[in-house]
Image (cartoon, coloured by chain):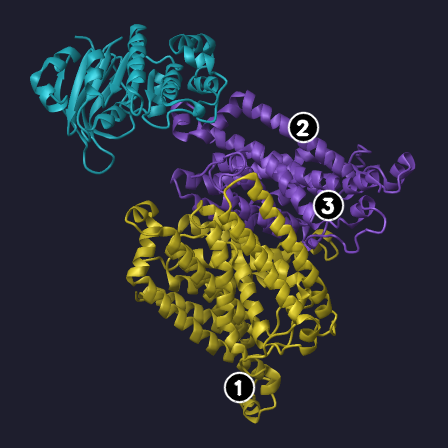
Chain colours: A purple, B cyan, C yellow
Amino acid sequence: MEPLNALVSVTNFMLIPALAYGSQLALGALGITLIYSILRFAHFAHGDTMALGTAGVIGGTFYLQAQGVSIAPLPTALLAIPFGMVVMIGYLLAADRLVYSYYRRVKAKPLIFVMASLGVMFVTNGITRLLMGVGETRFEDGERFLFTVREFRDFTGLAEGMALRSAQALTIITALVVMVILFWFLNRTRAGKSMRAYSDNEDLALLSGINPERVVLITWVITGMLLVLAGTLYGLDKGFRPFNYFQLLLPMFAAAILGGLGSPLGAIVGAYVVAFAELGVTYAWRRVFTYLMPEGLEPTSMMQILPVDYKFAVTFAILVIVLLFRPTGIFKGKVI
Amino acid sequence: MADPVLIGEGMTGGYGGADILHNCTIAVEKGQIAVIVGPNGAGKSTAMKAVFGMLKLREGSVRLAGRDISHLSPQARVAEGMGFVPQTSNIFPSMTVEENLEMGAFIRRHNIRATMEQVYELFPILREKRNQAAGELSGGQRQQVAVGRALMTEPTVLMLDEPTAGVSPIVMDELFDRIIEIARTGISILLVEQNARQALAIADKGYVLVQGENRYTDTGAALLADPQVRKSFLGG
Amino acid sequence: MTLKARDLGLFAAMVVVLAMVGMFQSWQLAVTILNMSLISAIMALGVNMQWGYAGLFNVGIMGFTAVGGLAVVLIAQPPVTEAWAAGGLGILLGLMLGVATILAAAIVYKRMPPSKLRGAAIIAVIILGYLVTSQIFGPAKRAVQAVNPAAEGYLGGLGLPVILAWPVGAVFAAGVAWVVGKVSLGLRSDYLAIATLGISEIVIAVLKHERWLARGVNNVTGIDRPVPRPVDLRPQPWVESLADTLGWTPAQTAAILSGLGYSVLFLIVLALLIWLAERALNSPWGRMMRAIRDNETSARAMGKNVTRRHLNIFVLGSATCGLAGAMMVSMDGQLTPGSYEPLRFTFLIWVMVIVGGSGNNWGSVLGAFVIWFLWVQVEPAGRWFMDLVTSGMADSSTLRQHLLDSAAYMRLLTMGIALLLMLRFAPRGLIPER
């Protein structure tokens, strides 16, 4: 029985990756929930716009690297994020002007908006692939590890090792900071409050003199920033492949619905629940139990509940459970 | 006679289909309370919405302090000094009471605190609950939030669409008292009401509408005394 | 509903375009486009039933077509007796235990009063069920997968005529749709979208991963075909003489004839479906569906069970997609789970429905032809376009090379733009609903 080793093992293979993945999902799900509460539709282009924004950051990173700019030990991509954000916000605003604003004007049904976002998804998808191809692009540089397995073992003298990759640490810290700023913005600033008011009661917001187009603009700007951050952190952590970004759509939606569509806090909680469930269910617990069980009783199987290929099934199961038992989500989102 | 603070004169129009209002006139003087009553479907709320610019008039005009505002959107009318409390969904439920008031004052940037102080004076319970989500309050308290929100723009005219719908008689009396208080500060009040008897009791001017037309127009007291009005609209 | 002259003109134009493909590119390509268009048309019909008749937004088309494709393997492939002996019973028992676990959990949920205890009981049932199931299922699965893994390693099918798989594919898809619909219909309209998106990813994950079922990513190939294969046709004397007359090679002739065989089968199915769909649309049932779509609240107020009706149509539409999926696999003669991609199998079908005219069956068919034609032709066109744009650059230029390599993705861009333009400027599509 070696509980400490078990703890280290589970932290290394489950907790840290889940925390990082959850943070990436949270940033994405926040965008989905914001768009949902202000523009009132499910934004299907979310994953692909995230890929495009990340492509922008990668372009910037490669340029900076070619110029010999470096902020080692931090990844160069951090410097390119503002550039990616500008590109992303410009793109989203252009999409809004060219596509969505028309449907707002004619007061189209929500599903028409969703359909339009499918169109945007296709276009964005095409542009991203034109720029980046479909293969994997790695753009992580700088120090790869805060501490490695070996360093950890030497330091603690434990049998089990643990590593913390800089991309993971960066993800978790950035996500925390961004969430704090976002909540400060929504709860303390005039613009943020006007967004909440608009989401709460559109007609009354109009009567109070809140300009809807301005609220929409702010929403896209914030979403753009969140998307670029989420996409860059995900890419630093796991590498950039456009299709993976598209596939993030499902867990991001699941997170937003689980938390309660329209509730930013819910999106964050939902994202971590989804991340921990996905990794927890597909993680092979054998090692942990080998440490925990008395000698002679060690597990013989992998102790993996589901193979990794089924991580979507986990997300989906969560989604189904929420839809069946509490369609408004944990934090009572909108039910229209 | 000088123009009243707010007048919708000879209003004719509807929501695109057939006309609902026919040559209907509603006016309110400074610091006075005008009440629109009438049977169901008489166009009471429609008349108020017409004054507020929420439906298109084919004929007639709306003037605020002598200025023709018929072409202005409701939002622009708010900026001109008209406050409006809709009948339903008249608060921001997930925001705190104080934030509701702040949103009411969105178009103003100065001196919000003082106005908020006045609202709290008027509705002390709101001060107590100012950090609570407005959606969690009782029906009567929500109406206070709604009225408070509209007052935050410092309107010259406050329009209320059936503010007592669905609240208990005690709360109703309380609300009417507050409305009188608001009128005393010089704000003109235009009120649409189901509870005709109580409303006319506080009204300086009453309008009885039937099928989108003015049927009787007089002071509140005179209408209450009129046997015809009593018989047809006040249940004897 | 009859077709107007304008609509017939559009279809005639499509025929001319396909004929031109035959004359200027190759007849083989024309037949391939025709066949895939017919299959797409059936998928689009299914989606149109859901969206056009009832306003249901299904983004899991890929899953339903894949389930239909699975039916082909399970029906037409010969059973692998060795594998059945190794673990067939265990797998069946395991599956039954899995279902029993879910049922047991449901019974606990229904019977016990809501409390913490109930939650604990449900979790206990699920954990126990999982442990028992995996004890039986796991070894059986491994045993099956160990049987001749290079060529088999799965249970195989029933060895029945392949054509039977088509209706079975429809039934499979209907079953999946029923479960999804039961969960997510009656809630917000976009919940169905997200639920279907999820189920389609899971179906693909199951197909890829469960090798005992249909060999997973190892693919099942050489599935029996309902029409003679080109290799069998080629030695026939009449084929050779036909090739002589037309001036084609015998191989080409055989391929085209085989393809045309499919075309005939597909056309029969499509005609049957359109006939049924049109009958349904113009029946009292169809009018009710459209009434529900246009004003759900008032339909509800009139006592219509909207959720129930939605479930009907959702199952029917998905079954149609399953049928098309089965037809596609039996045309390819193989099931390749790795090739199922949402952009191609879900969203492209949506573009077809929107461009064709949602709510109109003929519109969906035309949309399928137009969009599939574009899908096939945009790639070479994109290459040509990129070539033109970059013609000023040196051949060795990396940018030129990159752009030429990326031409394939012009497809997605074009489809997106087509969808957006139609939605904006002709939201009723090429052949609008009447």
Q: Residue A88 is drawn in which quadrant?
A: top right
Q: CA distance from mark 2 to mark 3?
A: 21 Å
Please identify the quarter of the rendering in which residue A205 is found. top left
Circle 3: residue type: Lys
Quadrant in the picture for the N terminus of chain C? bottom left
Q: The C terminus of chain C lies in which quarter of the figure? A: bottom left
Residue at the (65%, 59%) spot, across then down: C133
C152, above or below A160, in the image:
below
Name the chain under label 3. A
Q: Secondary structure at mark 1?
A: helix
* Mark sitting on residue A177: 2
Left or right? Give the position of C186 relative to C3: right
Query: Residue C225's spot in the image, x, y percent?
Result: 57, 79
Residue underneath mark 3: A238
| Position of C152 relative to A92 (above/below) | below
- Badge nearest the viewer, 3 or 1: 3
According to the image, label 1 marks what residue? C246
Q: Secondary structure at mark 2?
A: helix
* Residue type, label 1: Leu
